[in-house]
Image (cartoon, rainbow, N blue to C red):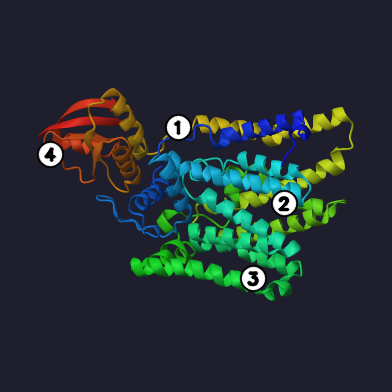
Amino acid sequence: MINPGKISLSTIGWSLLFMLVLYFPTIHYINHLPIRWWDESLFGLRALHIYKTGDYLSNFQLYDGLMDHRNTKLPFTTWIQVLFMKFLGVKVLALRLPVIMIFLATVAFTLRFAKKNLSAISIGVIFTLVMICSPGIVRDHILRTGDHDMAFLCYLFVMVISCFQYLECNSKKYLGLFAISLIAALLTKNLLAGAFLPGLLLYTIYSKKIIGVLTDKFVWIIILSVVGIFSGSVFYLNETYPGFVDRMWGYELMGRYTDAKDGHKGGLGFFLNDLAVTSFKIYFWMVPLSLLVLFTKKLSGISSRLLICLGIVYFSYILIISFAETKLFWYGIPIIPVGAMMIGIALNHIYNVYILNKKKYLRYLILSVFAIIVFVIPYKGIVESIIQDQIMHGEERFGLFIKKISMDHPSIRSFTLADKDFGTAAMWYKEQYNIENGFNINYQSNNTFGLGETVMTCLYDVTPNILKQYEVEVIQIWNNCQLIKIIREK
């Protein structure tokens, strides 16, 4: 039990400041923007399908009017989102809040690990600051939306730390945590979870622990358990939805490694360039420099070994994904937490060895200048990007327009939502408002309507086609969206 008398006011103050700094990149404006087109709304509909049917291993393709897009990723993180739906209802927040909670749990895990095992909670604090100041983390598709990439990289990071701890102390609890996090990653992003394993294997060989690992019966129990759970899930889905394995292998796994899918091409240096210029920026250059502290004095044994482990995982992962033909920025994001931890170890060591013994005013000056350049300026940019974030696709306006209609025309609760192509964002809002708000919204993608039908659309290439075919009464216009009533055919 914690004795409040032993907690200083400065500790409370720093803790509150830390939580405030965490708030803006994670929680602030999280419900401000509508559900995103493609992955967020696609995974959202799968969560909604499970929520409505109770079929927890489903390859959903059952929404009337929606194109057949079988989901080839396994649903571990979706299950967590379904759990949040049971408490929060069918809302976008129920998709995004679980991702944030997984990230915050990873922060707590890292802080505890840094304090207990590295005797320096400051390493965990620096790790957190690097994470929330990295544009590749605090953005849509990662931390700020209900996509699964943020959860995936958190599982991978916990897996790496757990593996390292098992090698350090041969504790079965860390081996168990390694297995749980690996299973979570596999059941979220399939075999991409294995891209960290070559680096961990190389470190195991480097640390001369490979014989001990291979002769540990619990390791083989874990291997058989992980393989059994993953292959069993895939086998079940293939039996239930014939052709699942072929599509997963050809479209998601080796298909994306050997072919550029959906036009997502790039050169061998695509991920290095993205990390350096866009996603990791200044921290990208700090990662290789962090390895230089290995050649300095007084770096503790465990910190030195962890830095080597993380470095091997970091660079081996970049090498592996660089040869993939399909190039998407979020394939490179999983190494950011690994790099952030490397930076934390290095900066903590540099402070303790080279700065701590300086005169107080000089120490504060160095820290202030460094913090402004490395953390304050990037953090300011992150917060501004959150406030200024914009709607990217017409489909993403549907939810905002429906909300506006409900306020401006409360009597209009039945209409047809005119859409085209992928349609997942529009379908999500049709389902959300019908379930949560008692609307009667129909989804239509062929743009053929009956006389007297009320129609809503937000797509620039759908509205003109409707106006060419029909004479209409305009009920409301907002931000390229229109609510109209079909009067007669032209």
Query: Is label 3 in a helix, a strand or a loop?
Result: helix
- What distance separates the C-alpha of mark 2 from that of mark 1? 37 Å
Question: What residue sits right under mark 4 in the picture?
Answer: 450
58 or 242: which is nearer to us? 58
Query: Is label 4 in a helix, a strand or a loop?
Result: loop
312 or 175: which is nearer to us? 175
Q: Residue at horizontal 77%, vertical 45%? A: 120
Viewport quadrant of the C terminus: top left
Question: What residue sits right under mark 2 in the picture?
Answer: 288
N-terminal-most mark, 3 or 1:
1
- What distance separates the C-alpha of mark 3 from that of mark 2? 32 Å
Query: Is label 2 in a helix, a strand or a loop?
Result: helix
Viewport quadrant of the N terminus: top right
- What distance separates the C-alpha of mark 4 from that of mark 3? 64 Å
Query: Residue flagged by tag 1: what amino acid is it?
Result: His
Q: Position of residue 156 (x, y in %)?
A: 59, 56
Q: Toward which corner of the image does residue 404 lie, by quadrant?
A: top left
Task: State whether residue 139 appears in this view.
Answer: yes
Question: What residue sits right under mark 1 in the picture?
Answer: 32
Query: Residue flagged by tag 2: what amino acid is it?
Result: Pro
Question: What residue sits right under mark 3 in the picture?
Answer: 219
Closer to viewer: mark 3 or mark 1 = 3
Label 1 crowd (10 A; few <14 / some 14-19 / many >=20):
some
Relative side of 35 to 461, left or right: right
- Farthest residue to the top: give it: 408
